[in-house]
Image: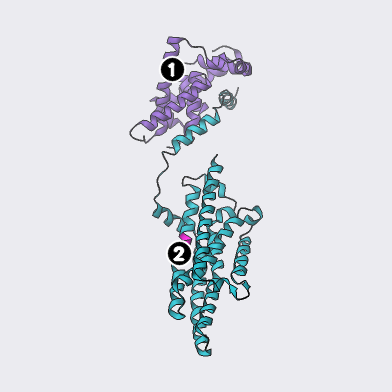
Amino acid sequence: MDIEKYYDKIYRYCYYKVNSKTLAEDLTQETFLRYIGSLQEAKEPERYLYTIARNLCIDEYKKKKETTLPDEDMDDGSDFENKTLEKLRLEEAMKRLSDDESEIVELRLLNQEPYSEICKIMGISRFAAHRKLETAKKKLKSYLEKGEIV
Amino acid sequence: MRDKELKKLLQDNVTPPDYLKKDAFIREHRSKEIPHVSAPRLLMQQAGFIRKRVWIAMLILIAFVALDIMLKMRDMLNVGYTADERALSVLNTASFFMPFISALGMIEAFKAQLHGVYELEQVTVISGKRALFARLAVVGLINFLPMMFIAVLMKVTVGVDIVRGALVILIPYLLTMILCMEIERFEWARRSAFSFLIPVFLVTALVHFEVGDLSFLTLSVRALLIIFVALVAVQAFELKKFSNMEDYAWN
């Protein structure tokens, strides 16, 4: 498997889930280690990698909830200064989407995965994927332009 | 807001990963995935990359040496040269062509450097140095057999000692190889394959240089053996340097 090919995609995917650079890096590497550690190489590594990454992010989210750790990036003063208002608004907008909607935005808009792949990863039909993406886009645009979700 | 703008905003929002960390991780785990290519397979593979015209040119040169030895032999027998004179003449012919054969092989082995794509070769799945060594080995092996045939031919036709004949052939060949590897390091030399002619002329001049009665061709077998061993050591050192250069390229 070509790690280089998928590294950035998995990193971006994790980044939006955990909203922390260091944590996203760790989760990305953990994803690949788990994939490499599995006995067989999957026929569709992308799908397998996203599934591992998603599960790792969920675990991390649960841990975070229990320990209520502050966000690393937000905690770092210099990093925080560099964050633009637009970025904060975008993060806020992403938080307002449902899990499925944010998932499809990450896969389609962020990582530009084809619909066929998204359908396999999310286990939904092509039509449902398209409809979810359109709804998510509408919500994001509405929040970013008007400051509220219509 | 257009879809394109939203997409860009989403992508720009991601803080890029730490490249050093990413690179270290990829390197560490990529090494485990590199498919093992066995030495014979690599040799066959690299032999395929050597152009046919180069094989043909090298074999023609070697055939020419063999033919020249046989023709000279016939003429000299008619005219009545002494055995020593016949041996010297034949050795002269054999040693004269060796630098050309060697340089031709080196041009082909170093074609990545000459075409300015050696960096590309260094980062391919199969190590660049392994590929280079394989090419050098293929060229060397292919040349070695006909060269030994010439040594045997000299023994059969003129009675030149087989070790002496082989050394007289191998020393100019090896020296040209070393000088080609040295000259290849210069950027001006990499611009044209003709720069490999410099070692050829140098070696040819050196081989035929005479100080009184003493010349390369009249050296004793012992002296030739010492030179040969020294050249092998230098060549091993050169190859080691090449091997290190790839590590530098990686780091």
Which chain does the cyan colour mark? B
Q: Position of residue B28 (x, y in %)?
A: 46, 35
In the foreground, A125 or A33: A33
Q: Amino acid at mark 2?
A: Ile
The residue located at (47%, 80%) in the rendering is B158
Q: Which element type, helix, strand or loop, lies under badge 2?
A: helix
Q: Which residue is mark 1?
A: A60
The answer to whether tags 2 and 1 share a subunit is no
Identify whether B75 is placed above or below B149: below
Outermost residue toward the left?
A39
In the foreground, B225 or A56: B225
**Numbered label attached to residue B142:** 2
Q: Is residue A28 magenta?
A: no
Identify whether B112 is placed above or below A34: below
**2 and 1 marks in contact (CB < 8 Å):** no
In the foreground, B105 or B70: B70
Q: Position of residue A72 (x, y in %)?
A: 53, 16
Name the chain letter of the residue that bears numbered label 2: B
Sort mark 1 into few (<14), some (14-19) or many (20+) by Cα contacts within 10 Å: some
**Numbered label attached to residue B179:** none
In this picture, which residue range is highlighted in magenta?
Answer: B138-143
Camera-near label (2 vs 1) is 2
Q: Which element type, helix, strand or loop, lies under badge 1?
A: helix
Q: Position of residue A125 (x, y in %)?
A: 40, 26
Q: Amino acid at mark 1?
A: Glu
